[in-house]
Structures are given as structure tokens and as C-alpha cells.
Image (spheres, helix red, strand yellow):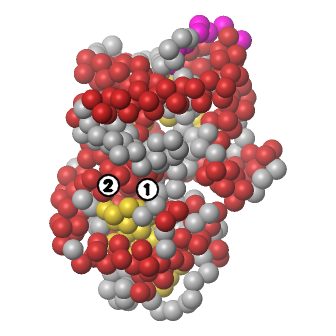
Amino acid sequence: MTAKIVLATFGSHGDIHPFIALGKVLQARGFHVTVASSGQYRPLFEREGLAFAAIGPDEEEMARRLGASPREFVKAMLSDHFFIFKISQDLLAENVSDLMPLVAGADLVVCHHIAYAAQLAAEKQGAPHVQVLLSPLLLMAPDDPPFMSTPPFGDAPFAYAPGWLGRVWNRMLAAVFREAFRPLTRRARKLRAELGLPRSRDLPFLPGGARAILGLYSPLMTRGAASELALGATFHDGGVVAPLDPKVEAFLGAGPPPVVLTLGSFAALDGADLLRAGVAATRAIGRRALVIAGRDDARFIRAPKGDDLLVWGYAPHSAVFPRAAAILHHGGAGTCVQALRSGRPQLVAPFFADQPDNATRLARLGVARVLPRREFTAELAAEALRALLEQPDYAIRAREAAERIGPEDGARAAADVIENLLKNERRPALESFSSQAHAGWREENA
């Protein structure tokens, strides 16, 4: 009998594409796969032949309920680092209700760590579940502690130190998050009780409670024991089925490789000024610039026109990054993967969430320089880009990283783990470190 697997994910395209890759591999192996996510992503999954179920409000309905424009929504996320968790809790009961019939009879639920509704539905229906992490930020590994740019931890001198300092750092960080999350998750704990589920020491929306954690990111981004969970990067971004627009192809072919600038969904919503400064920096060092600003957002990037600049709505990173001289981006997990694969030096301007940690890890690899959003100016960006392009070590390290990440296939490796779990086979190292990751976030008293 064919096993039924439900994949559940929410977020931006960087949270969606890895689940497309995983779903396709699982389906090719004969599993019955259904993906649950926000309705606006239906075309992306169905185009790849994956069954889809819309969960909760889509993007437009969410904006209507909040009475906020997309720009206001992003500004709220940037000003309140717990905003997305608050919104997730507001939607929790509705999402659980939508997921219950979908999860009924599932042999396994595979969920993004923020898709707590899927975890609750799985527990209620008696289905085992595993969690997916798309970056190593939340692992709390003592030999690979995370970097946080938010108060009170921003720029702490020991924030990235391994060993006993790393353990001290992790304990401090976890304690602060536990205290911050208690009031944020009251409704989540109440809903657990209403569903008849036992109390749990695991914090909602963070790693915990799962049979295993699957790290769909490159081991290049980790070190030490944390590498046990790094199953490899996934590279799906639609580039195979969405070739470059002729205008983008013409621009790339009309001169030397440009600097490619992209901030994902932040381009028009809160990154237009940064992109304009990035264009000015690129011109200051005599380079051409290709700005990828989002399908509906290119109009917000008002930079002086010229033959040395193309502002475009969408182009697959997998198609344009390898043809760049350097890449300026925000440090989103999916963008980091494609930038590493391209073998090009990177200037990272992180905004929030896992982006500062991702940026720090890229700098540690020697493939990037970091210029935080709050410090970003055309002058400093020009200085950083000039160093990236003129100091040969960056190009050498970037090519080495590309050679190492190129053979990775996180979706295939994750599918192997899932198959073994369904056969009740164990990976002791994986389960042991998963337990450690869970324990790092557990409340002292449930």
C-alpha cells in the first residue's frame, strides 16, 4: 500500500522551493504526496505535478484581515522580531481545522518548523511527524552557536565562539527566547488542551516534539556536531521551467558580467533605498548592474536609467547568478544556496530572522562580506564590492564552495531518511542530535 505523506510549509519562496524539491523526489519514489500551504502558492506546486491543499488565508485575505498593505506587513516584521509568531498564533486554530482532514490517515507529516498547526494536527490524528529546518540558526549546537543581531545579543563578542563560550551563549539565548515566547504562545498551549493533547515542554514554532529534524541546508553552513543534521542544499527555484526573458538574456550578453542585486520580497517593500544605493555603488566601481526586484515591484526601484542598468521583475537565481561578477543579496536561505552554487563572491545586507546568521556563516567561509542594512550606504557598498572583485581570495573561496555544494541533493537525502523512518529504521546519530536540538528550546517547567 502506498504511504501517504503530507508536506506543510509557510513563508516566502525560500520556504516553498525546498518543499517542491522534496515533494517531487518523494512522489517519484511512489509515495502519495500532498502539500499544504498558503493558497497563493498553488500554481507553483501544481505546475510541478504535486497535489495541493490551501491552508488558512492566502496573501490577499491576510492583508485584508490585518488592514495592512504588504509594505506595512514587512515593516511590522522588521520592527517586531516576534511579529510572524504572533500572526501564526492568530491563525493556529483555523489552520489546524483545515489540516485535520488532510492529515487523517497520513503515514507521515513533514512540516516546516514554523508550521506548528501541522504538528498539532499530526499529534491529534496520531500521525508521526518530522520537522524541516532550512537554515542552522535554531539548532543551538554548542560547537556552532548562532549569531543574533537583535538586542540584547547584537554584536556580542562571544556570539560565534565555540566550546564553553558557545554553551554559555546558547543558554542565555534560549532563556531569553523562552521568556519571550511564554506570553506569545498562551493560545497555542490552550489549543493543545482543547484538542485533548498532553502538555509539552517544547515551545511552539521552534524545533521540538518531532521524531527527527531534517536539515535542508548545506553542511558548508555548519561545523561540528551540527553537521549531522545537514542533509544538503536543495536547488529548485523554477529555473528549469522558466527560462530567462529575452531582455534579461540580451542585457547579460551585451557586456561584461554585471553585479546582480536582489533582496527577495523586501525589494520594494522595505529595500528600495538599499537597492538604489547598491546600484550607485556598482556604478561607482565601473560595473553594470542587474536588479531583480520582484514581479510587481520593479517600479519602486527608481535609479537613474542607463545602458549599464537593467531593473527586472523576476529571473531565476539559478540562471542569472552564475553569470554575475558578484551578487548583492539579503541573506535569505534560498538565495544563499543559489549564490554559493554560482561560485561568485557575495555582499550580504541582512534584514532579520536567520539572515544575519546566514550572512555571518558566509563570511566565515570566505565567500562574502557583510554590510548590515542599517549601515548600508553607497560608499561602503562600493568599498565592499571593490574588495570582493579585486581581492583574489574571495573568488578562489567562492569557486571552492561551488565545487563542494554542487553535488549536494538535500531533497534526495531527506527522502532517504523519510523512507527509513517509514520502515522503522533508525539513524541513531540523527535522532540523538535531533533530541539535543529539541532540548535546547524546551521550557524549564511545562
Q: Amino acid at mark 1?
A: Gly
Q: Are marks 2 and 1 in contact (CB under 8 Å)?
A: yes
Mark-to-mark CA distance, 2 and 1: 9 Å
Tell me: residue 234, above or below residue 271.
above
Q: Secondary structure at mark 2?
A: helix
Residue shown at 59%/9% (left/top)?
199
In the rendered image, residue 172, in percent from the top left (x then y), is placed at: 44, 30
Residue 166 in the image: above or below residue 403: above
- Does residue 379 appear in this view? yes
- Sequence-wise first label, 2 or 1: 1
Residue nearest the viewer, comparing 433 with 35: 433
Q: Is residue 434 left or right of residue 20?
A: left
**Magenta region, residue range:** 194-202
Give me the residue at 51% from left, 46% from top: 150
Q: Position of residue 254 (x, y in %)?
A: 38, 89
Asked whether 370 or 411 is in front, the reply is 370
Q: Mark 1 — residue?
A: 331
- In reply to whether residue 441 is colored magenta, the answer given is no
Quadrant (top left/top right/bottom left/bottom right) for the C terminus: top right
